[in-house]
């Protein structure tokens, strides 16, 4: 006699779901992981044949392993014991905080994402916004570096686009690891940055436990040969000027450095500049301590910016945002720097300030001199004058000659100085920073600070030039 077993629909669905999960866990996910792991290994093998600095094994170590190594580092364990007694809390509570900090800081580098998707997106984005140029690169020595060498790229911080532009232009040399501020801890940007090897920093944190976890991670990465990119200024320039160095991350990297040891640290100065910084007006508002715009106003501004670019593209008058240029300077070997500078090489490096100041000087020396900065500098010196195009070009040519005579790097589009000045004027006119009437150019009074912002990008170079007789007379008169 046949019998029928009945069961509720929800029970059948639950059984089907459990079977699907079992199948996913034991067959589909392992197969997918094997496939992507194989693809990643193929990419790593391929890029290592062309990179000046190969991807170190530390960068490829599983994230969970790095987090455990960081959490149970002897210095962190020792500090945890001290704080436990000082704060009258259990060690387990502090170790939970350490675990949270470690998970926040340690990246999850993904070679497939970095060299395929991220590089492709960075290239499309930077070329969509700028005419991107590599001014020069003195990196012949990079390919000959020992695997134990720690490489640190030090660059000035002009824009949030620095991360993308530098990543794109450095991709033929190495895979950079950035320290990124808390502004980027939003979904999905946070995940993308972590997959690209970036790590997050709470810049204003006063918690000694957090600072120690960050310090140890930076040292672990440096000792593991991870090429790092650091902004010594610590934050974006609000007024366009090259800022003074902060000693935080640089101090972590060099702390305990032994000039007699096997490991050396190599610093690569990087200078970056733009004909237009996308967030320039917001930075000036911050410099003047004005309140931030409301989110709705920011959205309207962004929409207007996007609409204007689309309209200019339609009518054939879109010149993007001018030029973005990066210069890679000559590598500085820390052991050699200490020896040539007469510093004590018999013990660990204790004072990083002279090194930081020297690196900022080197970065400043290779900051690209771009068309907008040249035109803005000349006009900012005499902001009330109405300039004819001929007079303006003559003054810019004179400034350019002085800068080049002192060895500073100017990017001249197409190798044509006349065209370079035309580009600078055109950019400022399109943004209404300059008014053009009857063949004369004059500053828009409402945007005089913006004009000075772009002049400030090379102000540290112009200040070193000898004064002309006319400038001496003007100064004497004031």
Image (spheres, rainbow, N blue to C red):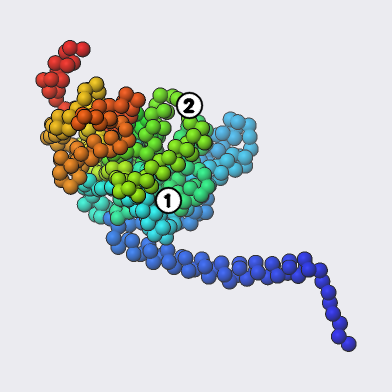
Q: Which residue is mark 2?
A: 291
Most foreground residue, 408 or 217: 408
| Other residues around mark 1 within 10 Å, as few (<14) / some (14–19) / many (≥20) | many
Upstream in the sequence, badge 1 or badge 2?
Answer: 1
Query: Which quadrant is the N terminus positioned in?
Result: bottom right
The image position of residue 451, as x and y in percent, is 29, 29
Which residue is rendered at x = 25% and y = 23% of the image? 383
Identity of the residue furthest to the front in this view = 438
The image position of residue 45, as x and y in percent, is 35, 64
The image position of residue 78, as x and y in percent, is 52, 39
Which residue is rendered at x = 82% and y = 71% of the image? 7
| Relative horizontal placement of residue 111, taking residue 76 as reference (left or right) | left
| Relative horizontal placement of residue 294, taking residue 334 as reference (left or right) | right
Q: Is residue 51 above or below residue 366?
A: below
- What is the C-alpha distance between the residues marked 1 and 2? 33 Å
Residue 197 is labelled as 1
| Relative horizontal placement of residue 82, taking residue 151 as reference (left or right) | right
* Nearest to viewer (mark 1 / mark 2): 2
Q: Are marks 1 and 2 in contact (CB under 8 Å)?
A: no
SS class, disc 2 = loop
| Relative horizontal placement of residue 5, taking residue 292 as reference (left or right) | right
Q: Quadrant of residue 39?
A: bottom left
Which residue is rendered at x = 37% and y = 56% of the image? 120
Most foreground residue, 189 or 474: 474
Residue 391 is labelled as none
Residue 123 in view: yes
SS class, disc 1 = loop
């Amino acid at each position: 006699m046949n019998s029928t077993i009945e069961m509720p629909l929800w029970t059948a669905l639950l059984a089907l779901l459990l079977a699907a999960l079992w199948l996913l866990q034991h067959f589909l996910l392992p197969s997918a992981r094997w496939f992507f792991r194989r693809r990643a290994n193929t990419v790593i093998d391929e890029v290592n044949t062309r990179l000046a600095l190969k991807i170190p094994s530390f960068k490829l170590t599983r994230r969970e392993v790095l987090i455990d190594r960081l959490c149970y580092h002897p210095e962190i364990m020792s500090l945890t014991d001290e704080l436990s007694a000082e704060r009258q809390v259990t060690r387990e509570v502090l170790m939970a905080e350490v675990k949270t900090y470690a998970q926040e800081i340690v990246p999850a580098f993904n070679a497939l994402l970095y060299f395929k998707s991220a590089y492709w997106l960075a290239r499309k984005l930077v070329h969509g916004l700028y005419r991107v140029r590599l001014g020069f690169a003195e990196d012949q020595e990079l390919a000959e570096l020992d695997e134990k060498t720690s490489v640190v790229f030090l660059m000035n911080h002009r824009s949030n686009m620095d991360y993308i532009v530098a990543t794109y232009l450095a991709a033929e040399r190495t895979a950079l690891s950035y320290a990124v501020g808390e502004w980027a801890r939003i979904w999905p940007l946070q995940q993308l940055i972590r997959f690209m090897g970036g790590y997050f920093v709470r810049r204003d944190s006063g918690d000694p436990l957090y600072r120690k976890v960050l310090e140890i991670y930076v040292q672990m990465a440096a000792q593991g040969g991870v090429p790092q990119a650091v902004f010594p200024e610590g934050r974006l320039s609000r007024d366009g000027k090259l800022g003074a160095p902060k000693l935080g991350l640089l101090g972590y990297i060099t702390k305990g450095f032994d000039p007699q040891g096997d490991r050396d640290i190599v610093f690569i100065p990087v200078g970056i500049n733009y004909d237009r910084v996308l967030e320039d007006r917001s930075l000036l508002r911050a410099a003047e301590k004005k309140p931030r715009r409301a989110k709705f106003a920011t959205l309207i501004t962004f929409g207007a910016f996007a609409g204007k670019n689309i309209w200019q593209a339609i009518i054939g008058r879109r010149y993007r945002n001018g030029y973005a240029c990066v210069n890679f300077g000559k590598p500085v070997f820390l052991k050699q720097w200490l020896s040539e500078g007469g510093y004590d090489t018999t013990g660990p490096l204790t004072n990083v300030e002279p090194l930081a100041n020297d690196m900022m000087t080197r970065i400043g020396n290779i900051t690209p001199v771009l068309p907008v900065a040249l035109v803005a500098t000349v006009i900012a010196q005499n902001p009330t004058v109405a300039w004819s195009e001929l007079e303006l070009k003559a003054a810019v040519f004179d400034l350019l000659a002085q800068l080049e005579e002192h060895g500073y790097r100017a990017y001249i589009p197409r190798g044509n100085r006349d065209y370079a000045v035309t580009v600078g004027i055109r950019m400022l006119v399109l943004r209404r920073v300059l008014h053009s009437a009857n063949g004369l150019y004059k500053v828009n009074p409402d945007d005089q600070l913006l004009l000075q912002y772009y002049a400030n990008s090379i102000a540290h170079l112009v200040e070193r030039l000898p004064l002309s007789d006319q400038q001496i007379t003007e100064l004497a008169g004031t």
